[in-house]
Amino acid sequence: MPTVSSNTRPLAETKSPIDMTRTMAPEVPGFREYIIEGLGKIATLPELSDIVQRHRFHGTTHDKAVAAQWLGRRLGTAPDSSRLLLTGGTQNILMILFSRLVPKGSVIAAEKLTYAAIGQLAMLAGVSVLPVDIDGDGMRADALEEICRSHKVAAVYTNPTGHNPTTSIMSAERRQSIAEVARRYGVAIVEDDVHGFITKYAPAPIATIAPELTWYMMTVSKCIGLGLRAAYLVAPNAETLAQLLASIPSVSAWFVPGLSAALITNLIETGAADEIARSISAEIGFRQEISQDILGPFGCMHTNGSSLHIWLDLPHVWTIENFVDAAAEAGVTLRHPNVFAVPGTEIKSNIRLSLIAPATRSDLREGLSRIAGLLQSRM
Ligand SMILES: Cc1ncc(COP(=O)(O)O)c(C=O)c1O
């Protein structure tokens, strides 16, 4: 039977609650210095007032040239700048794509468990999301095909690398099968490569298999920091992107914030962005080891080893509600996993635990030990 680390304190002794809900990039050594240096450089630029007082639209020519090289590391080759935008974040891109790619009467398909914002963004865009079954390899191609046969699917949203919330990494073969289904049914692929730069063994994106169908998104939220509110979009081709832009020329809501764009471009050019991403991966590695140490012996943990969170299979003695309540009593804040369920999907026995929300490794140890105490109490 797994033993609980000695730093699990009885409830009476617990200090403030440990939040294990949200995932974000951890602060890492050197981060502060890189940001100070980058901001200092920007502060001396002759175009500082333009950066702050003018629109940077979807990035300058230089931003795009730098981004193309950087993204080329995930995409195999640098995409042509005419296919590339800097935007105000993945959520902004999704709002636009869901609104523009999905005609009335058509729907979006997505992994049946998905990023918590997808349902809300689809609601804002006035489109429905249909759940596609998943397995250990991510979205099932046969399930996608079944939905494409029976519905007018305009686009499939997928998060194949470090799937949120299950942490699965879609194999290269599965990516090929998903691309083939999308091609057969003329469905656009909206690929969210949010964890692409922090996942150790990430297969090439689906965008490399079906570039003609894929709207590829890479945010800086997880590999640098979410406060920058910025993400890149690579469109299937220059013409499709030009058409999209021509239909909403005055919508500045998804323009990239100028200061963020200037800083990100600087961080990429100096190599600091890579250093930060590497340090974030290393910190995740330490935190993954801690979680293996404490929860691994219970045999109920899913992770890919590079993930900002873990996904637990709760033993059947627990309902999700009981577990969330018991965790709150033990001083750990958890979110009900229904936030990840596409309507029509029921989650019976899983919980996501963020390894990053606890500020320090020792807070993480404490939080996980409290969770281990709960699991052990009903073995
Ligand atoms: C699957 C997924 N995509 C994207 C994001 C980030 O989106 P944004 O670029 O809007 O910060 C997250 C953040 O949690 C996420 O989990």
Image (cartoon, rainbow, N blue to C red):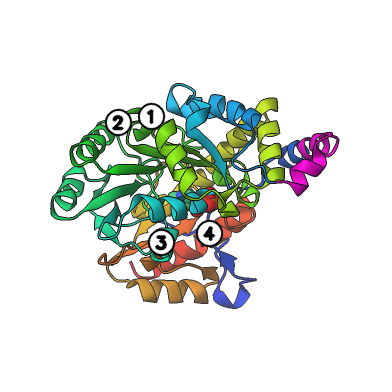
Disc 1 and disc 2 in contact, CB within 8 angstroms? yes
Number of other residues with Cα within 10 Å of mark 3, as a class: few under 14, some 14 to 19, many 20 or more: some
Q: Residue 172 has which mark? A: 2
Amino acid type, residue under disc 4 in the picture: Arg
Give the Cα distance between marks 4 and 3. 25 Å
- Answer with the quarter of the image where residue 184 lies: top left
Mark whose residue sits in front, 4 or 1 = 1
| Of marks 3 and 2, the one in the foreground | 3
Seen in the picture, residue 349 relative to 114 is either above or below; the reply is below
**Residue 20 at x, y = what percent?**
53, 61
> Where residue 250 sits: x, y (%)?
57, 52
Q: Quadrant of the C terminus?
A: bottom left
Classify residue 355 as left or right of residue 2: right
| C-alpha distance separating marks 3 and 1 | 30 Å
Residue at 30% from the left image edge and 48% from the top image edge: 156
Instruction: Judge the density around disc 4: few (<14), some (14-19), many (≥20) Cα neighbours within 10 Å.
Output: some
How packed mark 1 is, by other alpha carbons closer than 10 Å (few <14, some 14-19, many 20 or more), is some
Name of the residue lying farthest toward the top: 77
Disc 3 residue type (three-letter): Ala
In the image, the segment drawn in magenta is 36-54
Label 2 packing within 10 angstroms: few (<14), some (14-19), many (20+): some
Determine the CA span between mark 4 and mark 2.
29 Å
Mark 1 or mark 2, earlier in chain: 2
User: Of the residues under marks 4 and 2, which one precedes in the sequence?
Assistant: 4
> Mark 4 and mark 1: span between their CA atoms?
27 Å
Q: Which residue is mark 1?
A: 204
| Element under disc 1 | loop
Report the residue marked by disc 3.
Answer: 125
Kind of residue at badge 1: Ala
Which sits earlier in the primary sequence, circle 3 or circle 1? Answer: 3
Residue at the disc numbered 4: 22
